[in-house]
Image: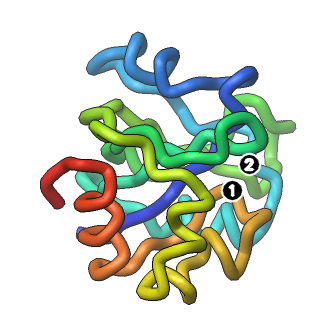
Amino acid sequence: MKHWLIKSEPDAWSWDQQVAKGKAGEPWSGVRNHTAKLNLKAMKKGDRAFFYHSNIGKEIVGICEVAKEAYPDPTAETGSPWVVCDFVAVEPLKTPVTLEAVKAEPKLAETALLKYSRLSVQPVTADEWKLICRMGGVKP
């Protein structure tokens, strides 16, 4: 299993909205960056992703799971290269992990969240996953 981080502005799509989708999940649409697209294409059913509130809050608030692997983004023009994966909410973090907390943890200095701050879909290493889960009060 690989681990990821997906970002959303909570005023556009929030953790609460993701949770409300239940087992039906939601396509992660609107990604228009080629690196983020490649990350979506690399995801496999069952992979886990942190759900990060960007711009407002700037914190990891929950964990999602890939329910359906990459397929054409229904919000894009026909024939475009853009894809989506479907995600379902798994569990909230007991304590949201803020961007400031990530920056303050030396073991997370190389995380994509800090190195590629504008990338909306990014990989998370196994060690980063375990540490952030512990910081958020959940089991890795």
Percent coordinates x, y for residue 44 in the rendering: 34, 60
Q: CA distance from mark 2 to mark 1?
A: 8 Å
Task: Name the residue at 35% across, 46% down.
Answer: 66
Left/right of residue 44 with respect to residue 12 in the rendered view: left
Left/right of residue 103 with respect to residue 22 in the rendered view: right
Assign a secondary structure to mark 1.
loop
Q: Quadrant of the N terminus?
A: bottom left
Of callouts 2 and 1, which one flags the residue occurring earlier in the amino acid sequence?
Answer: 2
Percent coordinates x, y for residue 93 in the rendering: 32, 40
Task: Name the residue at 44% across, 63% down.
Answer: 4
- Image height check: is 98 above or below 9? below
- Find out whether the residues at labels 2 and 1 contact each other: C-beta distance under 8 Å: yes
Residue on which disc 1 sits: 120
Mark 1 Cα shell of 10 Å, populated few (<14), some (14-19), many (≥20) = many
Q: Most extreme residue toward the left, as rendered?
A: 139
- Image height check: is 91 above or below 3? above
Left/right of residue 48 with respect to residue 29 in the rendered view: left
Give the residue type that dot 1 points to: Ser
Q: Most extreme residue toward the front, as rendered?
A: 104
Between disc 2 and disc 1, the foreground one is 1
Residue on which disc 2 sits: 31
Report the front residue among 14 and 74. 14
Q: Quadrant of the C terminus?
A: bottom left
Report the front residue among 6 and 98. 98
Q: Most extreme residue toward the top, as rendered?
A: 20
